Image (cartoon, rainbow, N blue to C red):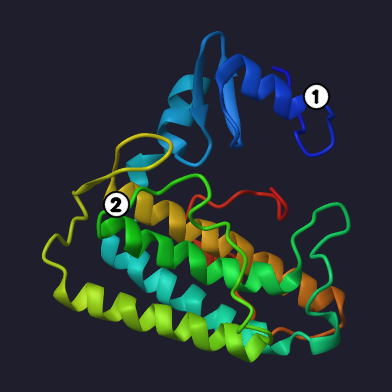
Amino acid sequence: MVVIDVLNDAGGRELLLNKYGLRKVPVLAKGDQYAFGQMLDPFAKLAGLPMPGLNRLSPEQLYKKYEMIFAAAQRYAPQFPPARFLERVIPHRERVIRTLCYHVFRIGEAFLETWDGAEYSVKIADNEPPDSMKSGDDIARYGAGVWQRYETWWQKLEDRKLSRVLKTYYGDTVAHQVFERVTWHSGQHCRQLIAVLEGMGIAPDGPLGATDFAGLPMPERLWE
């Protein structure tokens, strides 16, 4: 197996684009076949590994996990000193702390848009926060607003199995799997916010741990 780091390998992205016509990672390629790492079932199938979806959390369990993740990120965002809010999260990546805080909530908002008929496109959750969101408090309020929309969605939801098929850039996918993905995706970035706060010598307000994330197919490493 060959691993190509597209962030630090000058020709990595060009190889991915020229051979497979892809711009998004992570990707597992085998001959002419490939699978996006965003959805673990086809990724595992191509790699010849056990299917991770066999023990998937129910939609209700995912909803409760996501509620916990949103609440935690709303606590963490205001903890960042304003003078450091535009610093890079880690030195070799361009994303700044302000954008990462926003991204946690934007991922969830993008799912609701997809449920309403939008396509979960490559860049749907990667946009920058609007200029009006300058502080951690601003972004926490935005997160609270997104979660209010989730509460309304959940209360009115008839398809409690999330069996609807949604359009995504990695193919038509059952909503249950997409919801799992956005939950662990936001959770992974929440873990990163905890690490950045601790790196600044700031104790996170109610840090989440392994028990909180149990059942989610989280990456083992923090910066994957």
The answer, for residue 58, to whether it is visible in the render is no
**Residue 76 on image: x %, y %:** 65, 83
- State which quarter of the image contains the N terminus: top right
In the visual, does 151 lie left or right of 220? left
- Mark 2 lies on residue: 176
Which residue, as the protein is rendered here, is positioned at the far top? 31
Q: Is residue 23 above or below residue 11?
A: below
Q: Residues within 10 Å of mark 2 (few under 14, many from 20)?
A: many
Q: Is residue 136 above or below residue 182?
A: below
The label nearer to you, 1 versus 2, is 1
Residue 63 % position (x, y): 34, 69
> Residue 11 location, x and y as percent?
80, 24
Identify the amino acid type marked 1.
Gly
In the picture provided, is 171 more to the left or to the right than 50? left
**How packed is label 1: few (under 14 Cα within 10 Å), some, or many (20 or more)?**
few
Residue depicted at 48% across the width and 54% down the height: 124
Q: Would you identify the image quadrant in which residue 28 lies?
A: top right
- Residue at horizontal 66 percent and vertical 67 percent from the top: 100
Q: Please name the residue shown 50% across and 83% down the image.
A: 142
Q: Residue most toward the left?
A: 158
Secondary structure found at label 2:
helix
**Residue at screen point 44% across, 46% down:** 121
Q: Is residue 121 left or right of residue 154?
A: right
Residue 117 shown left or right of residue 171 in the figure: left
Whole-angstrom CA distance, mark 1 to mark 2, is: 36 Å
Q: Earlier in the sequence, mark 1 or mark 2?
A: 1
Is residue 89 visible in the rendered structure shown here?
yes
Tell me, for residue 198, which label it has, or none.
none
User: What SS does tag 1 mark?
Assistant: loop
Label 1 sits on residue: 11
Q: Amino acid at mark 2?
A: His
